[in-house]
Image: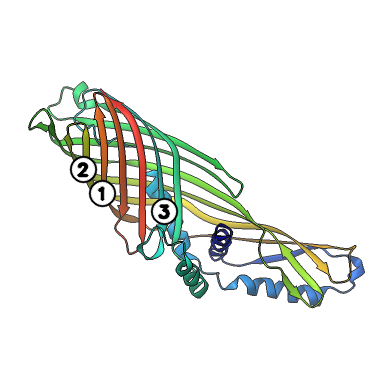
Amino acid sequence: MKKVIIAVLLTLCILGSVSAVEVKFTEVPDAWGDFAAIEDQLREKVIEKYGKYEEGEKLNKGIGNANALAAGGGYMRTANGYDWITVALSVNGAVAINGGNPFKFNDDFLDDFEEKGDLYMGAGLQVITASVGFNLGHLLKWDHGLYVTLKGGVSKLNTSDFDFNAYNLGFMVNYQLIEATNSSHAVKWRGLNVGAGLNYFSSTLKWTIDDLDPVKVGNFTYDTDLDVKSETSRFIIPVEVNTGVKLAIFELFGGLGADFMFGGDNEVSVDSDAVVTKAGDNVNKGKANMTMSKDGDLDTVKFRFTVGLGFSLGPVRIEIPYTQYFDDHYIGAIGVLGGVAF
């Protein structure tokens, strides 16, 4: 039941991201006679029902920031100082939630939504991302390593409730500012690595809500499902500095960075077909269509930190990175990466 409630609330939040509700009555049975007065009243009631959520700026930003953070994953961090090449596969997911609690799907969340009509929240996912890195410094015979990593990924997740599709492309150029050092056979400092690059992501989330209360005016009932689509895309310039320590087979790593975001789009739209019925008339039915869409504002720069735990055995690497934006809201991402470094 709570899953249905959360889905309904998210849809209503999405409705808050649109600038206006447009309702058109496409078919009206002749048997109903002069429907004009009732039509205006029904339209007014439908707009009134969703008017509370007209300003959904917080939701737009939550969705955009969560997707931006999720798209930033996929780069190997425990192989600073590798000789030739790295190859990796990864998955990364992020959430953005009001109030700093990533598990705040409870009665407090529902009460906050009911009171405010707009809530900061969002989710982003990169199901599979592949990356390959090259040590150009070694090839060019430089004293310090210059690394270039290319990555790309696709995400497709279809459930009974949601359809999610996304892809990401990017590259990162890293420079080994301070070389790695060995204190002993069991302990190794990965040195200090600085980097910058360019990422691009595009994601689409679709779902249908069919559990809303109908709108009633006199003998007429307006009953509709909501086909909701959220489309988000963004260019990101990541800048970061990171380091790490190897303790036997364990890897501890972390760093600081910033994401400079520009371009792209953040649009939410609803296309909903409604059925209009009249009490006592079991034969005739009317039809209506409700549409809305709006582009939302997005942040242009977000600062972040990354910490993580990894495991390395020979060329094999496994990493579990956690990244979080510095923000009044909670915006965090966690992923899993597996690969090899030679």
Residue underneath mark 2: 242
Q: Residues within 10 Å of mark 3 (few under 14, many from 20)?
A: many
**SS assignment at label 2:** strand
Rendered view: 303 above or below 284: above
Find out whether the residues at labels 2 and 1 contact each other: C-beta distance under 8 Å: yes
Q: Mark number for residue 95?
A: 3
* Residue at x 50% of width, y 66% of height: 56
In the picture, measured across the screen, residue 318 lies left or right of residue 291, that is left
**SS assignment at label 1:** strand
Q: CA distance from mark 2 to mark 1?
A: 8 Å
Viewer-nearest residue: 314 or 130: 314
| Labels 3 and 2: the sequence-earlier one | 3
**Position of residue 210 measured from the top left corner of the image (x, y, whole percent):** 67, 58
Residue underneath mark 1: 257
Of the two numbered discs 3 and 2 in the rendering, the one whose residue sits closer to the viewer: 3
Q: Residues within 10 Å of mark 1 (few under 14, many from 20)?
A: some
Q: Mark number for residue 283?
A: none
In the picture, measured across the screen, residue 236 lies left or right of residue 32, that is left
* Residue at x 89% of width, y 68% of height: 281
User: In the rendered picture of this protein, how many numbered marks are placed on residues?
Assistant: 3
| Labels 3 and 1: the sequence-earlier one | 3
In the picture, measured across the screen, residue 102 lies left or right of residue 159, that is left
Q: CA distance from mark 3 to mark 1?
A: 19 Å
Specify the quadrant that holds the N terminus: bottom right
* Residue at x 13% of width, y 30% of height: 186
Viewer-nearest residue: 280 or 46: 280
| Labels 2 and 1: the sequence-earlier one | 2
Q: Residues within 10 Å of mark 2 (few under 14, many from 20)?
A: many
Q: Amino acid at mark 3?
A: Val
In the picture, measured across the screen, residue 66 lies left or right of residue 226, that is left
